Image: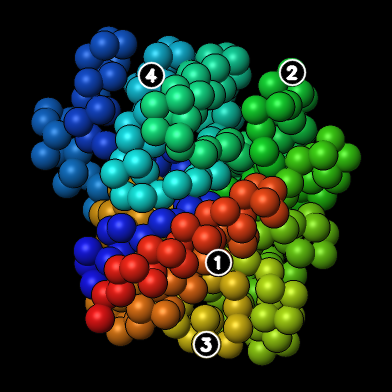
Amino acid sequence: MERFIQGLPKAELHLHIEGSLEPEMLFSLAERNGVQLPYASVEEVRQAYQFSNLQSFLDIYYQGAQVLLQEQDFYDLMMAYLRRCHDERVIHAEIFFDPQTHTERGVEFATVINGLQRAIVDAEAEWGMSAKLIMCFLRHLSAESAMATLEQALPFKDWILGVGLDSSELGHPPSKFIEVFARAKAEGWHRVAHAGEEGPPAYIYEALDLLQVERIDHGVRAMEDPLLMQRLAQTRMPLTVCPLSNVKLKVFERMEDHNLRDLLKQGVAVTLNADDPAYFGGYLNQNFIAAWQALNLTEEELVELARNSFLASFISDERKRSFIARLETYAQAAPAQ
């Protein structure tokens, strides 16, 4: 089954590129850019990646991002992730980036996006990799800061597939960002938002009704509201679920407690994703394997998760059909059982 998962064609829809900064690259970029780190070794960094909740994770996440300064840094970061995608049969990725994490430190928006996009172009040329960028607003910052970031992004509009909302969820409801999401919709961008990870089901309703999102990132707390679950199932509103992340951040105590399979059984369009893999202990295949082992997922359910990842993506219907055909050919030719 592990071999079956590793070869399964799939898409990833919830990956923060800054969260793929592995300790080895953190040290390498710090040295290249003359940035002092509060760690003496890669092992010390790994020890620091033990945190108890979303906020303690975010503190070290933003600290790590300090080493990203030059266009080449962003290129190297993205290229490392896309190379891993190629190795793991992730044939399409819609990748979050947090420009405010960098512009707040004085790094130009253009520096960030030029590096990321250059890697995407090179990966497509080298491996036929399909990848797009989703620009996230940091919800702990003001709505005005988000709108200013949207304005900065307009010259690069064609490189950006959509907008998202991430960072500290509690105390920063989606309703804080109604105007910026309305503007993003007017500009023709797709819209997604983190909701229902630490925040309550009410945040999911706000994301759907006030921000008019097309996907919910995380969304696992929807299970607390039967009417919301019914709505998600009937509309096939995708949830981009991140199992290893949820366990690491204590949304669930153990993988065996995760509600992923229950969501699937109730007809919700669940997809599987890695979130911040350098911090949460695994890229996409490791999330598939961990969920399969803990929840006894069947081969059919694993294929359903992969199929959902393509259906929930923002690519054309023609490309969706092409990718799903590859998936189904693989599943028929290489059954795990």
Q: Is residue 204 left or right of residue 268?
A: right
What residue type is disc 3 on?
Lys
The answer to whether any part of residue 152 appears in the image is no
Mark 2 vs mark 4: which is more N-terminal? 4
- Taking 20 as reference, is 176 above or below it? below
Q: CA distance from mark 2 to mark 4?
A: 21 Å
Badge 3, how many Cα within 10 Å: few under 14, some, many 20+?
few
Cα distance between the residues tagged 1 and 2: 32 Å
Please name the residue shown 25% across and 47% down the image: 49
- Residue 31 placement (x, y as % from top left): 22, 14
The percent coordinates of residue 10 (x first, y second) are 44, 56
Secondary element at tag 4: helix
User: What's the residue type where badge 4 is placed?
Assistant: Asp
Residue 194 found in image quarter: bottom right
Which residue is identified by label 1? 308
Between discs 1 and 3, the one toward the N terminus: 3
> Around disc 1, counting alpha carbons within 10 Å, would you say few (fewer than 14), some (14 to 19), or many (20 or more)?
many
Coordinates of residue 275 in the picture (x, y in percent): 43, 52
**Side of 295 relative to 311 (left or right):** left
Rounded to the nearest whole Å, what is the CA distance between mark 1 and mark 4? 32 Å
Residue tagged 4: 73
Residue at mark 2: 155
Q: Which residue is mark 3?
A: 265
Which structural element holds mark 2? helix
Front: mark 1 or 4: 1
